[in-house]
Image (cartoon, helix red, strand yellow):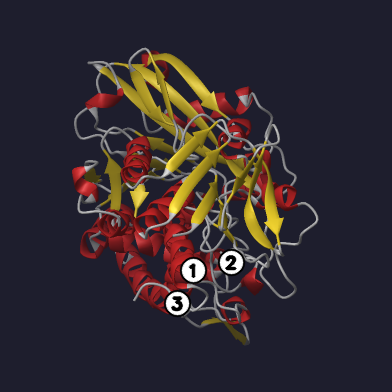
């Protein structure tokens, strides 16, 4: 039985802690804030309740597997999972609207044909078939296995089977999402639908590799899910599973260093000078934080994947509305930017802020979230990391855009609260409130994440800033990988 110190109580760290504890190890979690869950926080006021982090759960099988492997009580007995249908409603720049059924290729094709015109659905359906090939080629190395030592193979090979595009005397294949939209989908609204999956992760579709097609494919194939009471309930359930497996938690415990003895990790140093010795250390923190904790010791070696700083964060606006949620309202509506170029230049270039950005509107059908005859609504838009703390001018723009999805919004508004990148930084410790992106193949490896193992024996990394990257499913997968590497050793090759 080994002693294991876990730094941070984000979702990756919690899943690793639960798996390691059930394997018979003594696990202690040290979290600098006063609660668990990382970005999965909750804000409550006057009977209203809001998720301030992710609001929907893709690929719930990751957490189902966690609960099966850590005890007899399944996930569904600890939280109420609801499949969201329609999966999403989209309001495009030209005013066209479409609602897409959850996990139904035939239903999506029919809906797109009806809303966007004949052949639109077929083009999207054919695209999903090709996206499945990319998923099949990358699923195991990017999600289920430790990062390959020869990771350059993933960096160089584009897994998406692009359709040849002939222009003048040259034949080319799409290498980015933007080129897939222009050459294969050939409709600005389908392009907006495709690119929104990358944009939601803070990725610029003009340079994001074609391999990112796995993002819309995951949603199409495995559906979109909501946890009744909000996704904070998922964090609660995982935390309680850790407690049931005798994981120790120390909140308000600021780790100031990783202790080393004999050239390997040997515990953690805490503010105030105390030390917690351990046989293994699992760090669920951002790369900059890890560098500070390890001081002079290099964590990554020559030829390894280096941490890539994320440039994007989130602005979240929480709305308390008078009046009940109208029957038949979509859970999620994406209001697309009126000027795609202006939005991308504002996010990823030096242009001024776009007053009409893409905004995601979440309106859960959940009476737990608001007083009777009232509604809780959450608005989210991608913003640059390190956005100023107030975000007041952008907040007004976001509310204005949301009125396209919520008629009469301002007349119903009782009050609103804003969560900026500074709040994300406070909750997660990530510099500037940056949000990590999922690992993706191709693009020279710039969207891969460092291995869960490090140059320091006994020190492992977990969570969105390490393989396989950002997102709730990916965090859970990283926890499974770290547990496997510690329990089985370097020969661990992932789930079979």
Label 2 near label 1: C-beta < 8 Å?
Answer: yes
In which image quadrant can residue 81 be found? top left
Q: Nearer the viewer, residue 143 or 395?
A: 143
Q: Quadrant of the C terminus?
A: bottom left
In which image quadrant can residue 96 be found? top left
Image vertical order of residue 389 relative to residue 85, above or below: above
Q: Nearer the viewer, residue 268 or 359?
A: 268
Q: Secondary structure at mark 3?
A: loop
Q: Secondary structure at mark 2?
A: loop
Write the residue at 53% across / 53% down. Answer: 464
In the image: residue 174, left or right of residue 108? right
Q: Residue 465: x and y, percent?
A: 58, 55
Q: Residue 193: x and y, percent?
A: 43, 55
Residue at mark 2: 453
Could you tell me how far apart the alpha carbons at marks 1 and 2 are, in whole angstroms?
8 Å
Could you tell me how far apart the alpha carbons at marks 2 and 3 are, in whole angstroms?
13 Å
Q: Quadrant of the N terminus?
A: bottom left
Mark 1 residue crowding within 10 angstroms, few (<14) / some (14–19) / many (20+): some
Mark 2 residue crowding within 10 angstroms, few (<14) / some (14–19) / many (20+): many
Residue at mark 1: 485
In which image quadrant can residue 406 be found? top left
| Residue 463 in view in this figure | no
* Mark 1 or mark 2, earlier in chain: 2
Write the residue at 56% across / 64% down. Answer: 452
Q: Nearer the viewer, residue 143 or 25?
A: 25
Q: Residue 200: x and y, percent?
A: 50, 49
* Mark 3 or mark 1, earlier in chain: 1
Residue at mark 3: 493
| Residue 8 in view in this figure | yes
Q: Residue 374: x and y, percent?
A: 28, 17
């Amino acid at each position: 039985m080994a002693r294991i110190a876990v730094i941070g109580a984000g979702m990756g760290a919690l899943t690793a802690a639960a798996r390691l504890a059930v394997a018979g190890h003594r696990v202690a979690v040290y979290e600098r804030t006063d609660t668990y869950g990382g970005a999965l926080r909750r804000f409550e006021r006057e009977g209203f309740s809001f998720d301030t982090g992710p609001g929907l759960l893709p690929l719930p099988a990751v957490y189902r597997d966690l609960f099966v492997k850590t005890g007899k009580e399944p996930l569904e007995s600890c939280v109420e999972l609801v499949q969201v249908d329609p999966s999403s409603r989209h309001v495009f720049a030209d005013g066209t609207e479409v609602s897409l059924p959850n996990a139904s290729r035939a239903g999506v094709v029919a809906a797109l044909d009806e809303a966007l015109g004949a052949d639109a659905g077929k083009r999207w359906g054919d695209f999903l078939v090709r996206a499945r090939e990319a998923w099949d080629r990358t699923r195991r190395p990017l999600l289920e296995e430790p990062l390959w030592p020869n990771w350059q193979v993933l960096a160089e090979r584009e897994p998406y089977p692009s359709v040849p595009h002939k222009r003048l005397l040259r034949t080319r294949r799409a290498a980015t999402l933007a080129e897939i939209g222009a050459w294969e989908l050939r409709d600005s609204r389908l392009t907006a639908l495709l690119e929104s999956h990358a944009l939601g992760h803070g990725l610029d579709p003009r340079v994001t590799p074609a391999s990112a097609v796995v993002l819309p494919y995951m949603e199409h194939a495995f559906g979109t899910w909501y946890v009744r009471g909000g996704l904070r309930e998922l964090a609660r359930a995982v935390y309680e599973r850790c407690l049931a497996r005798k994981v120790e938690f120390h909140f308000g415990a600021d780790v100031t260093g990783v202790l080393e003895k004999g050239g390997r990790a040997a515990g953690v140093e805490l503010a105030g000078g105390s030390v917690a010795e351990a046989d293994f250390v699992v760090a669920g923190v951002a790369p900059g934080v890890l560098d500070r904790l390890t001081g002079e010791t290099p964590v990554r070696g020559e030829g390894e994947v280096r941490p890539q700083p994320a440039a994007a964060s989130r602005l979240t606006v929480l709305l308390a509305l008078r009046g009940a949620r109208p029957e038949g309202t979509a859970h999620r509506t994406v209001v697309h930017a009126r000027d795609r170029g202006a939005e991308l230049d504002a996010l990823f270039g030096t242009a001024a802020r776009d007053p009409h950005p893409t905004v995601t509107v979440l309106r859960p059908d959940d009476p737990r979230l608001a007083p009777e005859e009232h509604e809780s609504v959450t608005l989210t838009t991608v913003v640059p990391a390190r956005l100023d703390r107030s975000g007041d001018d952008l907040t007004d723009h976001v509310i204005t855009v949301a009125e396209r999805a919520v008629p009469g919004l301002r007349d119903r508004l009782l009050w609103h609260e804003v969560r900026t990148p500074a709040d994300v930084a406070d909750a997660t410790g990530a510099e500037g409130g940056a949000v990590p992106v999922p690992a993706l193949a191709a693009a020279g490896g710039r969207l891969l994440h460092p291995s869960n193992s490090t140059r320091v024996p006994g020190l492992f990394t977990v969570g969105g800033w390490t393989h396989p990257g950002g997102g709730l499913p990916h965090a859970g997968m990283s926890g499974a990988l770290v547990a496997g590497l510690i329990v089985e050793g370097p020969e661990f090759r992932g789930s079979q």
